[in-house]
Amino acid sequence: MSEMNALYYRDPYCREFDAEVVRCTPGKKGFEVVLTDTAFYPEGGGQPADHGTLNDVKVTDVRERNDEIVHFTEEALPEGSTVHGVICWQRRFDHMQNHSGEHIVSGLIHKHFGYENVGFHMGPEETLIDFDGMLDEEQIRMIEHEANELIWRNIATKVYFPGAEELAATDYRSKKELHGTIRLVEFPDADLCACCGTHVERTGEIGLIKITDSEKHKNGTRLHLLCGMRALRDYGKKNEETWNTAHLLSAKPYEISAHVEKLLDENGRKQKQISVLTGEILNFRASQLPEHQKLLLDFETGLDTVRLREFANTLVESRDAETAAVFCGQDQLWSYVIVSRSADLKAVSAELNRRLNGRGGGSRQMIQGTCTADRETITAAVTELLDC
């Protein structure tokens, strides 16, 4: 059976069929079955293979190999027997919607900007399309809008096999040089492309095209595309998140960004106030500690790395300590910063981390890191290594 004569091309909407088992052999993925005809589409052209059953035996993959369509099944099927095939239609139609949508988007981008589709991957969640040119946000939204207008017009898809003369006179898209029988898929006013995939009969069946994201990829643009039910599910999830967020903010859904911006401004002002107050508290805290110590060891809570470093420097400067070691945390989990005017901290860093089950390092004058130990163990180790 030639691939071009397969049932999935003759009738892409066929969901069930009967065929005879030509061959069934053991393989790496179970059993490999060849039929006299098939509605199962084999992986190819960026479109995943169909799944389904043959006589209730699961078909887990389908591949084209040496001009044959090979079905990978979980169980053996008797050669010469007639089997009833059932396509997982939800999966097939999802692929038809998204492959057709990809054609329309790619065709429109080629039509308006001359860019080529240089990469296409239809994953289980989204379709990725790579183009060899840069697209900005305004251009992407224009393409998306025009693509959906073509859906609303419910244009008939044309699939045909042109002869040599007609093919030579036809301007169509193709990612590679083709030989033999060429199958063209046309979405009028959008795209004409050589393709081996399955497609919807009319654009209205795609339902919706949504470009959810774009990014620079190599020297061009990568688009993230959702069509049909995928786009509807995505909208449903985002709509639910929007309403949940609006409820938390006590805002209307279309006012979320303004409310978030207001909260961020308020948070920024509060963080500045907290920073000023924290500085005052630490200066007061420093004033309560003894002066002129060879080693000043202190334990604090609630300080980030920047404040921890600032406080250690403050103890060296304002309390005239030769070495200040500040540990911040609780229980046995600590962050630390040690600053010194006299000791070579780099020389003791490894031993300190070994004793305190810690990680960190730095320079001769300052080291920082994290450790896991109780206060008594920390006090003993720091005192022995630095107060001598």
Image (tube, rainbow, N blue to C red):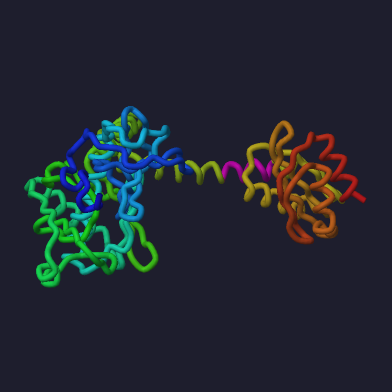
Q: Is residue 213 visible?
A: no
- Residue 250 x, y percent position in the rendering: 31, 30
Position of 184 with respect to 304 (left or right) is: left
Q: Which residue is drawn at the image coordinates 48% and 43% (left, top)? A: 28
Q: Is residue 282 magenta?
A: yes
Q: Nearer the viewer, residue 279 or 82?
A: 82
Which region of the structure is painted magenta?
Answer: 276-284
Report the residue that reaches farthest toward the front. Answer: 80
Q: Which residue is drawn at the image coordinates 40% and 43% (left, top)? A: 264
Q: Nearer the viewer, residue 193 or 60?
A: 60
Residue 254's image quarter?
A: top left
- Residue 243 x, y percent position in the rendering: 29, 31
Report the residue that reaches farthest toward the right. Answer: 388
Residue 303's image quarter?
A: top right
Position of 214 with respect to 147 (left or right) is: right
- Residue 204 x, y percent position in the rendering: 12, 43
User: How many numbered discs?
Assistant: 0
- Residue 255 x, y percent position in the rendering: 26, 39
Q: Main secondary structure of the magenta part?
A: helix
Residue 82's image quarter?
A: top left
Q: Is residue 155 magenta?
A: no
Q: Nearer the viewer, residue 257 or 240?
A: 240
Q: Which residue is drawn at the image coordinates 14% and 59% (left, top)? A: 161
Q: Is residue 179 visible?
A: yes
